[in-house]
Image (tube, rainbow, N blue to C red):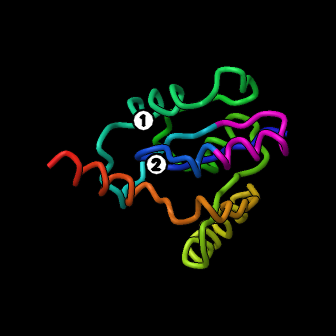
């Protein structure tokens, strides 16, 4: 079965890498879908972020591909024969938001699998990494 792991990935964190690694054990193929999120203001476009993700993932992970996408995740899944969406969750706030997305995607015919963050990675968010980088640049 093919799975898609969507996100804005601005930036791609060690927690994201961990979710991809664990998803590789569960699915035949994992597509990291670098998506446009209209509620976020990424520092670069999807293609640039996809290139950055590709540079981070180990080349020996041959069952993992990276794609830039600006449409609905469920649409990508239908067009590319992807059977499931993978989402990482760090805490209950993430779970509440992800549950709403999962219900919508399920109504569009694509189920979601949640992978809880490893405890040592749960505190790291893309927002925190961006804030740290900004403070170091000053």
Q: Is 101 placed above or below 7 here? A: below
Quadrant housing residue 77 = top right
Q: Residue furthest left?
A: 138
Residue at horizontal 64 percent and vertical 26 percent from the top: 58
**x%, y% of residue 93?**
55, 77
**x%, y% of residue 130?**
33, 52
Quadrant containing the N terminus is top right
Q: Which residue is mark 2?
A: 8
Q: Main secondary structure of the magenta part?
A: helix
| 118 displayed left or right of 96 | right
Residue at horizontal 30 percent and vertical 57 percent from the top: 131
Marks 2 and 1 sit apart, C-alpha to C-alpha, by: 8 Å
Q: Are marks 2 and 1 in contact (CB under 8 Å)?
A: yes
Q: Is 138 placed above or below 67 here? A: below
What are the residue bounds of the magenta stretch? 18-31
* Label 1: which secondary element: helix
**x%, y% of residue 63?**
76, 28
Residue in the foreground of this view, choosing between 105 and 23: 23
Quadrant housing residue 76 = top right
Q: Which residue is mark 1?
A: 49
């Amino acid at each position: 079965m093919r799975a898609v792991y969507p996100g804005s990935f601005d930036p791609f964190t060690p927690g994201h890498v961990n979710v991809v690694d664990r998803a590789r054990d569960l699915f035949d193929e994992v597509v990291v879908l670098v998506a446009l999120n209209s509620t976020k203001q990424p520092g670069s476009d999807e293609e640039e972020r996809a290139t950055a993700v590709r540079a981070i993932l180990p080349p020996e992970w041959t069952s993992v591909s990276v794609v830039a996408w600006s449409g609905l995740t469920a649409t990508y899944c239908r067009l590319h024969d992807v059977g499931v969406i993978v989402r990482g969750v760090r805490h209950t706030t993430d779970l509440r938001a992800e549950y709403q997305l999962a219900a919508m995607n399920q109504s569009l015919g694509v189920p979601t699998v949640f992978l809880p963050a490893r405890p040592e990675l749960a505190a790291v968010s893309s927002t925190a990494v961006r804030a740290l980088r900004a403070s170091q640049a000053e």
